[in-house]
């Protein structure tokens, strides 16, 4: 089996995942968590931090999105749970019902926005040159909308993150 074929076979078994990590705000927490992924050859697709307090894990969350096999996801989860400043790690498939995506897309000004089930949109700003649009909904729905804008060559730029509590 050639190296390209082996790489395709390996990637075919990978899924997209989201970890929601409860963590304390201590120096090195984010670095240690990121090292868990890096040391195992996993690149982070996205990261978001929210509500981190200095003495409690009640509201502090780190969200990591990445691609990995089920076995590697389990190793990553166990490794994160062993870090002293992390109290809990919840794992979700990227298309899980409770995950939501939020995106800000910079589009061509003549873009026609079509309604879709479970996709919420809000015009942030419209100028002669661009339409700035907020999109939110299920991860797969928001990604499909972004893909549609890209295919229609209307997408100029986008920032997106998946979130949950």
Image: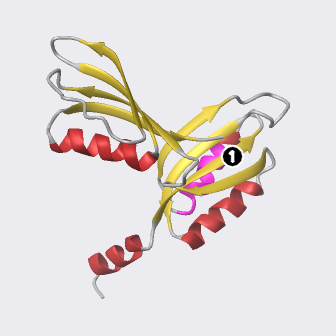
Q: Quadrant of residue 116?
A: top left
**What's the magenta region?**
31-40
Residue at 50% x, 54% y is 94
**Horizontal side of residue 16 vs 71, given as left or right:** left
Residue lying furthest top = 127
* 5 vs 74: above or below: below
Residue at 35% x, 74% y is 7
**Horizontal side of residue 75 vs 57, given as left or right:** left
x, y percentage for residue 132? Answer: 30, 21
x, y percentage for residue 37? Answer: 57, 56
- Look at the numbered disc 1 and give the secondary structure of its residue: strand
Residue at 78% x, 57% y is 82
* 51 vs 28: above or below: above
Q: Quadrant of the N terminus?
A: bottom left
Residue underneath mark 1: 21
Between 128 and 112, the one lying in front of the other is 112
x, y percentage for residue 61? Answer: 68, 38
């Amino acid at each position: 089996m050639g190296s390209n074929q082996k790489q395709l076979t390996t990637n075919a078994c990978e899924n997209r995942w989201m970890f929601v990590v409860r963590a304390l705000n201590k120096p090195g927490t984010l670095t240690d968590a990121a090292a868990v992924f890096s040391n195992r050859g996993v690149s982070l697709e996205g990261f978001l931090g929210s509500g981190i307090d200095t003495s409690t894990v009640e509201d502090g969350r780190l969200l990591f999105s990445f691609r990995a096999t089920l076995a590697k996801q389990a190793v990553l989860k166990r490794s994160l749970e062993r870090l002293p400043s992390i109290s809990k790690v919840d794992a979700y498939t990227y298309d899980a019902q409770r995950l939501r995506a939020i995106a800000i897309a910079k589009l061509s000004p003549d873009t026609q926005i079509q309604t879709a089930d479970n996709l919420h949109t809000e015009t942030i700003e419209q100028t002669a040159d661009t339409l700035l649009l907020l999109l939110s909904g299920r991860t797969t729905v928001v990604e499909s909308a972004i893909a549609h804008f890209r295919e229609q060559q209307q997408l100029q730029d986008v920032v997106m993150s998946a979130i949950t509590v």
